[in-house]
Image (cartoon, rainbow, N blue to C red):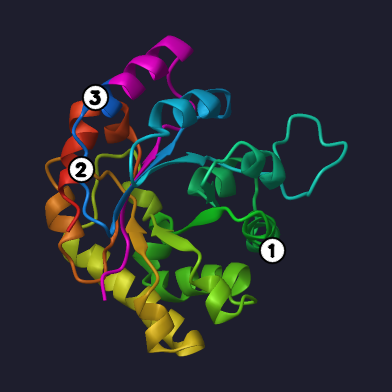
């Protein structure tokens, strides 16, 4: 079985409207030679969602992601954006639990469980982020730490629902630092995550869930990292802000 292989861009809080439009034009002018199991997700800032949706509407297997959604269905939450709003725009994906949201906005595993439920209820595909900081890695407790993130945010779901989620493993010590986990380090953690999923839901379910790697992925290392048996693509930050670089990342999908 071919799991979905996904190159997911995360622009974070970057680019003006004009810069975003230029990047989208460059990306959409590229020839996306994607196989049936390969997908591209463009995680753009909220103000650019409509533009990204319009420019990618006719491109097969290319979708748009919001970088977050609210932990409430609707109501008096000034400045928040609900999963229902995203669904009404035809946004396909939503990035949840990114390490920056956890660190700077204090998003807990419990809050993220609520966001996952709200996103799924609206038919969105959550790209659920997990990962450890450097002290956890140095203490050698990263496997238990990351498994707990899955358990507390995802394991209340039944197997059929869980299969609608994409997981992104991001070693926080390798994000924006220029440090990259080796392809084997990425594979080791992805295999551990898949084993955790199998222990809870069975091997068949675990084998159908895409697990992306997020940590300084770029054109020059994408093919090697994505070539690992349990790595199903990447959640890409800085390299997704350059059309030619992100095109190389996409080309690294297996």
Q: Residue at x 42, y 73 (%)?
A: 141
Instruction: Name the image quarter holding the N terminus.
Output: bottom left
> In the displayed image of the protein, which residue is found farthest to the front?
58
Disc 2 from disc 1: Cα separation:
33 Å
Could you tell whether 178 is left or right of 44 in the image?
left
Could you tell whether 48 is left or right of 61 in the image?
right
Q: Which residue carries the number 1 mark?
A: 110
Instruction: Name the image quarter holding the C terminus.
Output: bottom left
Q: Is residue 217 above or below residue 112?
A: above
Could you tell whether 56 is left or right of 98 in the image?
left
Q: Which residue carries the number 2 mark?
A: 249
Residue 65's tag is none
Sequence-first tag of 1 and 3: 3
Residue 98 in the image, given as x and y percentages of width and height = 50, 48
Q: Nearer the viewer, mark 2 or mark 3?
A: 3
Q: Which residue carries the number 3 mark?
A: 29
Q: Residue at x 65, y 48 (%)?
A: 106
**Magenta residues (range):** 1-25
């Amino acid at each position: 079985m071919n799991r979905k292989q996904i190159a997911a861009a995360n622009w974070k809080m970057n680019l003006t409207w004009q810069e975003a439009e230029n990047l989208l034009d460059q990306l959409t002018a590229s020839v996306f030679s994607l196989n049936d199991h390969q997908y591209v997700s463009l995680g753009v800032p909220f103000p650019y969602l409509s533009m990204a949706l319009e420019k990618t509407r006719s491109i097969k297997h290319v979708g748009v992601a919001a970088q977050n959604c609210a932990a409430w269905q609707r109501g008096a939450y000034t400045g928040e954006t609900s999963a229902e709003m995203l669904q009404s725009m035809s946004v396909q994906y939503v990035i949840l639990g990114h390490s920056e949201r956890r660190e700077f906005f204090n998003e807990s595993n419990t809050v993220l469980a609520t966001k996952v439920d709200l996103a799924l209820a609206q038919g969105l595909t959550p790209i659920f982020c997990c990962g450890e900081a450097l002290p956890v890695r140095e203490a050698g407790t990263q496997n238990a730490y990351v498994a707990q993130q899955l358990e507390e945010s995802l394991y209340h779901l039944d197997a059929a629902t869980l299969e609608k989620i994409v997981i992104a493993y991001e070693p926080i010590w390798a994000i924006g630092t220029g440090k990259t986990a080796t392809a084997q380090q990425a594979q080791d953690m992805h295999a551990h995550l898949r084993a955790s999923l199998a222990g809870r839901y069975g091997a068949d379910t675990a084998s159908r869930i895409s697990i992306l790697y997020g940590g300084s992925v770029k054109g020059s290392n994408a093919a090697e990292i994505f070539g690992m048996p349990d790595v199903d693509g990447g959640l890409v930050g800085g390299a997704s802000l350059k059309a030619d670089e992100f095109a190389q990342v996409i080309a690294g999908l297996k």
